[in-house]
Image (spheres, rainbow, N blue to C red):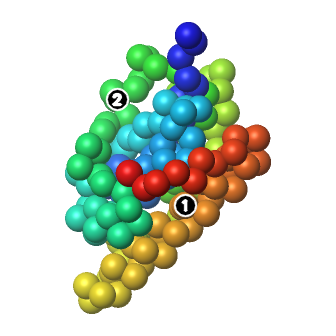
Amino acid sequence: MPAKPQVLFICTGNSARSQMAEAFTRRYAGEHFDVQSAGLEPKGINPYTIKVMAEAGYDMSAHRSKSLREFMGHTHSRYVITVCGHADASCPRGLWSNGIKLHWPFEDPAAFQGSEAETLEQFRKVRDQIEAKVIAWLEEIGVRPQFAQPG
């Protein structure tokens, strides 16, 4: 059986946006793709990311913040999707030499300055934007999102 094509989400820290995109793509299209995420400068998963993804029914306990170096020269990604401007500008071309590179710019919820309640709301806003973008993209490329039980 041939390997599933890889989707690699990249941001600077692999702490929020790319983790959320990985989780939603696995949820909705994990049977179609090998889904990964990485950061240019991994920082660990932001606690707010874990919290808002749990609210959406996604357990992040199996996730870890990964360095882009783990993927360089070892895997071929069919889709490389950057989710922040820094990653878009700094992503090595070799990652998608025979694939497709996309850029989905999302605000960095970790950079938000405010109370805990306001910060949580910002993380929820970005989470919901990422989920909607993942679903729209899957439909655009002809992959029907699987709206199964969260997990």
Give the residue drawn at x 48%, y 76%. 125
Judge whether residue 8 can be spotted in this image: no
Image position of 135 with respect to 54: above or below: above
Q: Quadrant of residue 32?
A: top right
Residue 140's x, y, as percent? Answer: 76, 48
Image position of 18 with respect to 57: above or below: above
Give the residue drawn at x 53%, y 17%. 3
Image position of 98 with respect to 65: above or below: above
> What amino acid is labelled 1 in the image?
Glu
Residue 56's x, y, as percent? Answer: 41, 66
Name the residue nearer the viewer: 39 or 55: 55
Give the residue drawn at x 70%, y 41%. 143
Judge whether residue 47 can be spotted in this image: yes
Name the residue nearer the viewer: 1 or 65: 1
Residue 30's x, y, as percent? Answer: 51, 37
65 horizontally vs 82: left or right: left
Count of picture labels: 2
Crowding at mark 2 (Cα within 10 Å: few <14, some 14-19, many 20+): few
Q: Quadrant of residue 150?
A: bottom left
Discs 2/1, front:
1
- Is tag 2's residue or tag 1's residue first in the polypeptide sequence? 2
Residue 73's x, y, as percent? Answer: 43, 17
148 horizontally vs 97: left or right: left
Crowding at mark 1 (Cα within 10 Å: few <14, some 14-19, many 20+): some
Point out the image quarter for the N terminus.
Answer: top right
> What amino acid is labelled 2 in the image?
Arg
Name the residue tied to disc 1.
131
Helix, strand or loop status at disc 2: helix
Disc 2/disc 1 C-alpha distance (Å): 26 Å
Name the residue tied to disc 2.
69
